[in-house]
Amino acid sequence: MARKKDVNSLAENRKARHDYFIEEAIEAGLVLVGTEVKSIREGRANLKDCYAEVRNGEIFIRGMHISPYEQGNIFNVDPLRDRKLLLHKQEIGRLAGLVSREGLTLVPLKLYLKGGRVKVALGICKGKKNYDKRDSLLEKAHKRDVERELKNRNRY
């Protein structure tokens, strides 16, 4: 079955769903320059191997790669620079407490457009062990087999 692409989705971190248990997801704004927004709209962003960290009461995304805009000139910036997230002070405090105490990680799950602005879905995640990953792959395979059988049964 083909995966439906969300209309407003610009980039997705599918590896995060394989490597982490996602406890909660929150929406945050992203501080970008103009050429980065144009490049993201063309689908040239990569969320693989990036994470968010709390520094001095602010949250930054590290390791998110946004390719330089082709028609950009001197306004292009470093593709791997740290980008600030826009959240309320109370939310930042709560996330900082969760990350420091409970061993959770902040992982960007998806970039999307909302009202013409680029937003990021930030997941509060707990790492999976290798046996957890194998279990989730087995469960996914069983589910796929059951759906295939139901589809074949309905055909005749």
Image: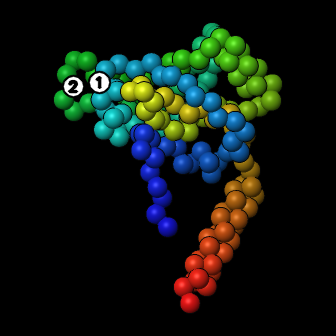
Q: Is residue 41 visible?
A: yes
Residue 14's place in the image compared with 143, above or below, is above
Amino acid of disc 2: Gly
Which residue is at a point 46% across and 63% down the rendered structure image?
2
User: In the rendered image, which residue does mark 2 sit on?
Assistant: 72
Q: Is residue 48 visible?
A: no
Residue 83's place in the image compared with 14, above or below, is above
Q: Are marks 1 and 2 in contact (CB under 8 Å)?
A: yes
Query: Is 93 left, or right, of 35 in this rendering?
Result: right
Which residue is at a point 58% across and 28% down the rendered structure image?
27
Query: Is 129 left, or right, of 78 in this rendering?
Result: right
Q: Residues within 10 Å of mark 2 (few under 14, many from 20)?
A: some
Q: Nearer the viewer, residue 156 or 93?
A: 156
Query: Is 50 left, or right, of 11 in this rendering?
Result: right
Q: Nearer the viewer, residue 124 or 3?
A: 3
Amino acid of disc 1: Thr
Q: Position of residue 109 (x, y in %)?
A: 56, 39
SS of the residue under disc 2: loop
Q: Residue furthest bottom?
A: 156
- Tag on residue 35? 1
Which residue is at a point 70% across and 65% down the rendered structure image?
139
Q: Nearer the viewer, residue 130 or 139?
A: 139
Q: Position of residue 144 (x, y in %)?
A: 61, 70
Looking at the image, how many numbered discs can be counted on the residues? Answer: 2
SS of the residue under disc 1: helix
